[in-house]
Image (spheres, helix red, strand yellow):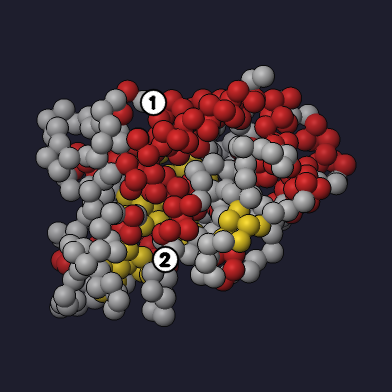
Amino acid sequence: MQIIRHSEQTLKTALISKNPVLVSQYEKLDAGEQRLMNEAFQPASDLFGPITLHSPSDWITSHPEAPQDFEQFFSDPYRKTPSPNKRSIYIQSIGSLGNTRIISEEYIKWLTGYCKAYFYGLRVKLLEPVPVSVTRCSFRVNENTHNLQIHAGDILKFLKKKKPEDAFCVVGITMIDLYPRDSWNFVFGQASLTDGVGIFSFARYGSDFYSMHYKGKVKKLKKTSSSDYSIFDNYYIPEITSVLLLRSCKTLTHEIGHIFGLRHCQWLACLMQGSNHLEEADRRPLNLCPICLRKLQCAIGFSTVERYKALVRWIDDESSDTPGATPEHSREDNGNLPKPVEAFKEWKEWIIKCLAVLQK
């Protein structure tokens, strides 16, 4: 295992900058916010730790990128910022997300609520769900995993055409695996920063995806024409568990972070770290490090205290009183399933620690 540890001065400059204008901006932040963000360069901090690399296939090793500090983010001429007329994040589901209509609808509501809290201050709206056929995307069966995949680039074109006037961005979510080009095995998600659109798949987040008994394997792709999407009529959807919900929330917020102009984080353990495989994605925390938190706050203009309180409320929401995975034959009649949030409990404790620092 390799630990990437930056000096206190490097982290301080990455967060605050040496540019007098940006230093002055930082000094105008609420005292509690400065106290929390200053944890970035406290070696003994138990809130923000260094990035750990576990194998040569981890993102930072296999995809070398220049790091982005706050000043570079702030000065980026191509960065998109929500404007008074474009302050809505739209979520477009493609295909079914759950084994029943009720599970599908509840799952989308949970993700929407999470995005509202994470990107506190922006509106999050749902577009009418669509079947895969409406997107007219290319699709294939993966040669290695033998599961259905849809073409991410085609979906991005579809979302761009559907983008409402008041949208800051439109994000597509699906339980079908994605591929960006023929030569690639798969991709968890893909976004176009210029167009403000992204597509993210949660197919590989089910507990059985990598098992020998995965039920989503397709023996042979039979289609009569390029417009024959009948194979998607009853495709396999994993059970919505707490771990799948947590992984979905991570991917969704990470990719929307890119649309705001946040590049992959190379400073501290952070949601915005890149990930090459599921094990690495699971090690990545749900929270932003102080450097990325300052970037997002600069883009949206939220109160950090209110944002953290909103995230705690989402975890504590009354519909999550009964923990556990969503059962296959759930309470179809009342349409109100328990939100499976047990995987978020540790993060809730972390947020409460941050609130204590903020409200000292």
Q: Which mark, residue 56?
A: none
- Whether 345 is drawn above or below 134: the answer is above
- Whether 152 is drawn above or below 222: the answer is above
Residue at x 41% of width, y 33% of height = 345
Cα–Cα span, label 1 and label 2: 32 Å
Where residue 258 appears, x then y in whole percent?
56, 54
Q: Which residue is mark 1?
A: 316
Q: Which residue is mark 2?
A: 187
Residue at x 32% of width, y 67% of height = 150
Residue at x 61% of width, y 61% of height = 2
- Going from the N terminus, do you reach mark 1 or mark 2 first? 2
- Left or right, 107 with respect to 303, comes to left
Which amino acid type is marked by label 1?
Asp
* Residue 125 in sight: yes
- Left or right, 351 with respect to 179, comes to right
Which amino acid type is marked by label 2?
Val
Q: Quadrant of residue 307?
A: top right
Q: Quadrant of residue 15?
A: top right
- Whether 93 is drawn above or below 329: the answer is below
